[in-house]
Image (cartoon, grey):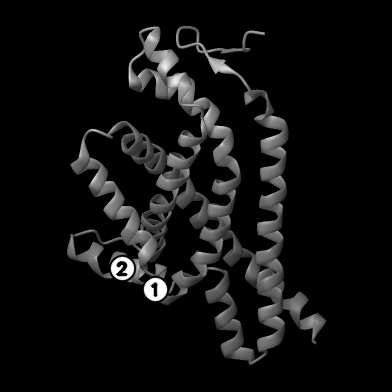
Amino acid sequence: MDIPFMLEILPRLLPALGTTLVVSLLSLAIGMVLGISLGMVRVLSQSAKPIRWLIDAYVWFVRGTPIIIQIYIAYFFLPMLGLKWNVFWIGVVALVFNSVGYQVEIVRGAIASVDQGQLQSAAAIGMTPRMAMLWVVLPQATRRMIPPLTNELANLIKASSVLSVISLFELTKAGDAIIASTFKFAEVLLLQSILYFAVIQLLSWSAVYLEQRVFNYGNGLMVNPVSGTANPPAI
Protein backbone atom coordinates (compact mmCIF):
# COMPACT_ATOMS: atom_id res chain seq x y z
CA MET A 1 0.00 0.00 0.00
CA ASP A 2 1.54 3.29 -1.15
CA ILE A 3 0.73 5.68 1.72
CA PRO A 4 2.80 8.59 0.33
CA PHE A 5 0.83 8.33 -2.92
CA MET A 6 -2.45 8.48 -0.98
CA LEU A 7 -1.27 11.62 0.81
CA GLU A 8 -0.20 13.07 -2.53
CA ILE A 9 -3.60 12.62 -4.20
CA LEU A 10 -5.63 13.70 -1.16
CA PRO A 11 -5.56 17.42 -2.16
CA ARG A 12 -6.88 16.41 -5.59
CA LEU A 13 -9.81 14.53 -4.07
CA LEU A 14 -10.86 17.13 -1.48
CA PRO A 15 -12.34 19.64 -4.00
CA ALA A 16 -14.30 16.78 -5.56
CA LEU A 17 -15.51 15.81 -2.09
CA GLY A 18 -16.68 19.40 -1.70
CA THR A 19 -18.71 19.06 -4.89
CA THR A 20 -20.21 15.83 -3.54
CA LEU A 21 -21.25 17.55 -0.30
CA VAL A 22 -22.65 20.64 -2.03
CA VAL A 23 -24.77 18.68 -4.50
CA SER A 24 -26.01 16.36 -1.73
CA LEU A 25 -26.84 19.09 0.79
CA LEU A 26 -28.51 21.23 -1.85
CA SER A 27 -30.57 18.26 -3.02
CA LEU A 28 -31.60 17.45 0.56
CA ALA A 29 -32.59 21.07 1.29
CA ILE A 30 -34.71 21.43 -1.84
CA GLY A 31 -36.06 17.94 -1.29
CA MET A 32 -37.11 18.80 2.27
CA VAL A 33 -39.20 21.74 1.09
CA LEU A 34 -40.93 19.63 -1.55
CA GLY A 35 -41.06 16.50 0.60
CA ILE A 36 -42.68 18.22 3.58
CA SER A 37 -45.13 20.00 1.30
CA LEU A 38 -46.14 16.84 -0.57
CA GLY A 39 -46.16 14.83 2.65
CA MET A 40 -48.58 17.25 4.27
CA VAL A 41 -50.74 17.33 1.13
CA ARG A 42 -50.71 13.53 1.15
CA VAL A 43 -51.93 13.42 4.76
CA LEU A 44 -54.48 16.22 4.39
CA SER A 45 -55.92 14.93 1.10
CA GLN A 46 -57.51 11.77 2.41
CA SER A 47 -60.80 12.69 0.75
CA ALA A 48 -59.15 13.91 -2.48
CA LYS A 49 -58.24 10.53 -3.92
CA PRO A 50 -56.82 11.74 -7.28
CA ILE A 51 -54.23 13.91 -5.49
CA ARG A 52 -53.29 11.09 -3.15
CA TRP A 53 -53.02 8.64 -6.06
CA LEU A 54 -50.72 10.99 -7.99
CA ILE A 55 -48.40 11.41 -5.01
CA ASP A 56 -48.42 7.66 -4.33
CA ALA A 57 -47.66 6.91 -8.00
CA TYR A 58 -44.69 9.29 -7.87
CA VAL A 59 -43.39 7.67 -4.67
CA TRP A 60 -43.79 4.18 -6.16
CA PHE A 61 -41.93 5.21 -9.33
CA VAL A 62 -39.01 6.69 -7.39
CA ARG A 63 -38.72 3.72 -5.05
CA GLY A 64 -39.21 1.18 -7.83
CA THR A 65 -36.63 2.43 -10.35
CA PRO A 66 -32.81 2.62 -10.12
CA ILE A 67 -31.25 5.99 -9.40
CA ILE A 68 -29.19 5.75 -12.59
CA ILE A 69 -32.40 5.63 -14.67
CA GLN A 70 -33.65 8.77 -12.93
CA ILE A 71 -30.32 10.50 -13.60
CA TYR A 72 -30.49 9.62 -17.29
CA ILE A 73 -34.09 10.85 -17.45
CA ALA A 74 -32.99 14.23 -16.06
CA TYR A 75 -29.91 14.32 -18.31
CA PHE A 76 -31.75 13.61 -21.57
CA PHE A 77 -35.22 15.06 -20.94
CA LEU A 78 -34.35 18.45 -19.41
CA PRO A 79 -32.65 19.64 -22.63
CA MET A 80 -35.71 18.45 -24.57
CA LEU A 81 -37.75 20.85 -22.42
CA GLY A 82 -35.43 23.71 -23.37
CA LEU A 83 -33.51 23.68 -20.07
CA LYS A 84 -29.84 23.91 -21.06
CA TRP A 85 -28.38 23.34 -17.60
CA ASN A 86 -24.89 22.16 -16.76
CA VAL A 87 -24.28 18.72 -15.27
CA PHE A 88 -24.18 20.09 -11.71
CA TRP A 89 -27.78 21.31 -11.81
CA ILE A 90 -28.93 18.28 -13.76
CA GLY A 91 -27.43 16.18 -10.98
CA VAL A 92 -29.23 18.26 -8.35
CA VAL A 93 -32.55 17.83 -10.18
CA ALA A 94 -32.03 14.07 -10.41
CA LEU A 95 -31.16 13.71 -6.73
CA VAL A 96 -34.04 15.97 -5.67
CA PHE A 97 -36.43 13.92 -7.79
CA ASN A 98 -35.19 10.78 -6.04
CA SER A 99 -35.01 12.24 -2.54
CA VAL A 100 -38.50 13.73 -2.52
CA GLY A 101 -39.97 10.30 -3.19
CA TYR A 102 -38.42 9.03 0.04
CA GLN A 103 -38.97 12.19 2.06
CA VAL A 104 -42.72 12.11 1.39
CA GLU A 105 -42.82 8.79 3.22
CA ILE A 106 -40.56 10.11 5.99
CA VAL A 107 -42.94 13.03 6.57
CA ARG A 108 -46.02 10.82 6.37
CA GLY A 109 -44.56 8.37 8.88
CA ALA A 110 -43.48 11.14 11.28
CA ILE A 111 -46.92 12.75 11.16
CA ALA A 112 -48.63 9.38 11.65
CA SER A 113 -46.49 8.76 14.76
CA VAL A 114 -48.00 11.80 16.52
CA ASP A 115 -51.05 10.98 18.63
CA GLN A 116 -54.01 11.57 16.33
CA GLY A 117 -56.10 12.55 19.34
CA GLN A 118 -54.29 15.88 19.25
CA LEU A 119 -55.85 16.61 15.85
CA GLN A 120 -59.26 15.91 17.32
CA SER A 121 -58.51 18.18 20.28
CA ALA A 122 -57.33 20.92 17.93
CA ALA A 123 -60.52 20.58 15.89
CA ALA A 124 -62.55 20.80 19.10
CA ILE A 125 -61.11 24.24 19.88
CA GLY A 126 -61.85 25.52 16.38
CA MET A 127 -58.57 24.92 14.55
CA THR A 128 -58.77 23.91 10.90
CA PRO A 129 -56.95 20.73 9.79
CA ARG A 130 -54.25 22.90 8.18
CA MET A 131 -53.73 24.96 11.35
CA ALA A 132 -53.61 21.82 13.48
CA MET A 133 -51.05 20.30 11.15
CA LEU A 134 -48.82 23.40 11.14
CA TRP A 135 -49.05 24.35 14.81
CA VAL A 136 -49.63 21.08 16.66
CA VAL A 137 -48.52 18.05 14.66
CA LEU A 138 -45.62 19.27 12.50
CA PRO A 139 -43.50 20.70 15.37
CA GLN A 140 -43.65 17.32 17.12
CA ALA A 141 -43.10 15.36 13.91
CA THR A 142 -39.99 17.41 13.06
CA ARG A 143 -37.92 15.78 15.79
CA ARG A 144 -38.97 12.34 14.62
CA MET A 145 -37.78 13.19 11.10
CA ILE A 146 -34.15 13.82 12.12
CA PRO A 147 -32.84 10.21 12.07
CA PRO A 148 -34.46 9.23 8.75
CA LEU A 149 -33.49 12.57 7.15
CA THR A 150 -29.89 12.04 8.25
CA ASN A 151 -30.04 8.58 6.72
CA GLU A 152 -31.48 10.13 3.55
CA LEU A 153 -28.57 12.61 3.37
CA ALA A 154 -26.14 9.70 3.73
CA ASN A 155 -27.95 7.93 0.91
CA LEU A 156 -27.72 11.07 -1.24
CA ILE A 157 -23.99 11.34 -0.64
CA LYS A 158 -23.54 7.74 -1.74
CA ALA A 159 -25.99 8.12 -4.63
CA SER A 160 -24.10 11.19 -5.86
CA SER A 161 -21.31 8.82 -6.92
CA VAL A 162 -23.59 7.67 -9.75
CA LEU A 163 -23.56 11.24 -11.13
CA SER A 164 -20.15 10.35 -12.52
CA VAL A 165 -22.05 8.78 -15.46
CA ILE A 166 -23.02 12.29 -16.61
CA SER A 167 -19.44 13.53 -16.03
CA LEU A 168 -20.06 15.50 -12.84
CA PHE A 169 -16.59 15.79 -11.29
CA GLU A 170 -17.48 14.60 -7.80
CA LEU A 171 -15.46 12.28 -5.54
CA THR A 172 -15.99 9.08 -7.51
CA LYS A 173 -15.31 10.73 -10.89
CA ALA A 174 -12.15 12.35 -9.52
CA GLY A 175 -10.96 8.98 -8.26
CA ASP A 176 -11.67 7.38 -11.64
CA ALA A 177 -9.55 10.05 -13.34
CA ILE A 178 -6.63 9.36 -10.99
CA ILE A 179 -6.94 5.60 -11.50
CA ALA A 180 -6.96 6.07 -15.28
CA SER A 181 -3.65 7.94 -15.15
CA THR A 182 -1.84 5.99 -12.41
CA PHE A 183 -3.46 2.51 -12.42
CA LYS A 184 -3.27 2.46 -8.61
CA PHE A 185 -6.71 1.07 -7.89
CA ALA A 186 -6.28 -0.02 -4.27
CA GLU A 187 -4.92 3.26 -2.92
CA VAL A 188 -7.50 5.44 -4.67
CA LEU A 189 -10.46 3.24 -3.73
CA LEU A 190 -9.30 2.99 -0.12
CA LEU A 191 -8.89 6.76 0.18
CA GLN A 192 -12.31 7.33 -1.39
CA SER A 193 -13.84 4.87 1.07
CA ILE A 194 -12.19 6.63 4.01
CA LEU A 195 -13.51 10.03 2.88
CA TYR A 196 -17.05 8.75 2.33
CA PHE A 197 -17.02 6.93 5.67
CA ALA A 198 -15.68 9.95 7.58
CA VAL A 199 -18.34 12.27 6.18
CA ILE A 200 -21.22 9.87 6.82
CA GLN A 201 -19.98 9.07 10.34
CA LEU A 202 -19.81 12.80 11.09
CA LEU A 203 -23.40 13.11 9.90
CA SER A 204 -24.46 10.31 12.24
CA TRP A 205 -22.86 12.02 15.22
CA SER A 206 -24.45 15.34 14.25
CA ALA A 207 -27.87 13.70 14.02
CA VAL A 208 -27.52 12.24 17.51
CA TYR A 209 -26.50 15.66 18.86
CA LEU A 210 -29.43 17.42 17.16
CA GLU A 211 -31.92 14.84 18.33
CA GLN A 212 -30.74 14.70 21.95
CA ARG A 213 -29.70 18.31 22.55
CA VAL A 214 -31.14 20.80 20.11
CA PHE A 215 -34.59 19.26 19.59
CA ASN A 216 -34.92 17.58 22.98
CA TYR A 217 -37.23 20.36 24.16
CA GLY A 218 -39.88 19.05 21.76
CA ASN A 219 -40.97 16.21 24.04
CA GLY A 220 -44.50 16.87 25.13
CA LEU A 221 -44.59 20.47 23.91
CA MET A 222 -47.35 22.03 21.88
CA VAL A 223 -47.05 25.24 19.92
CA ASN A 224 -49.44 28.06 20.69
CA PRO A 225 -50.94 29.07 17.31
CA VAL A 226 -51.44 32.64 18.52
CA SER A 227 -48.09 33.46 20.08
CA GLY A 228 -45.99 30.94 18.16
CA THR A 229 -44.33 29.79 21.41
CA ALA A 230 -44.14 26.30 22.85
CA ASN A 231 -46.29 25.63 25.90
CA PRO A 232 -45.50 22.79 28.33
CA PRO A 233 -48.20 20.18 28.79
CA ALA A 234 -50.54 20.54 31.71
CA ILE A 235 -49.65 18.34 34.69
Residue under the point 51% across and 27% down: 115
Above or below 201: residue 133: above
* Amino acid type, mark 1: Ile
Figure disc tally = 2
The reply to whether discs 1 and 2 touch (Cβ–Cβ < 8 Å) is yes
* Amino acid type, mark 2: Tyr
98 lies left or right of 144: left
Question: Looking at the figure, which quarter contains the N terminus?
Answer: bottom right
Number of the label disc, if any, that sits on residue 166: 1
184 lies left or right of 93: right
* Rendered location of residue 216, percent (x, y): 68, 28
Number of the label disc, if any, that sits on residue 56: none
Q: Which of the 4 quarters of the picture holds residue 79? A: bottom left
Disc 2: CA contacts within 10 A as few (<14), some (14-19) or many (>=20): many
* Rendered location of residue 104, percent (x, y): 40, 45
Residue under the point 39% across and 73% down: 166
Task: Determine the CA span between mark 1 and mark 2.
Answer: 7 Å
Residue under the point 63% across and 8% down: 234
Disc 1: CA contacts within 10 A as few (<14), some (14-19) or many (>=20): some
Label whose residue precedes the other's in the sequence (1 or 2):
2
| Viewer-proximal residue among 128 and 28 | 128
* Rendered location of residue 189, percent (x, y): 66, 80
Residue under the point 44% across and 14% down: 121
Q: Which residue is mark 2?
A: 75
| Viewer-proximal residue among 97 and 144 | 144
Q: Which of the 4 quarters of the picture holds residue 80? A: bottom left
Question: Looking at the figure, which quarter contains the C terminus?
Answer: top right
What SS does tag 2 mark?
helix
* Rendered location of residue 18, percent (x, y): 59, 59
Above or below 7: residue 56: above
What SS does tag 1 mark?
helix
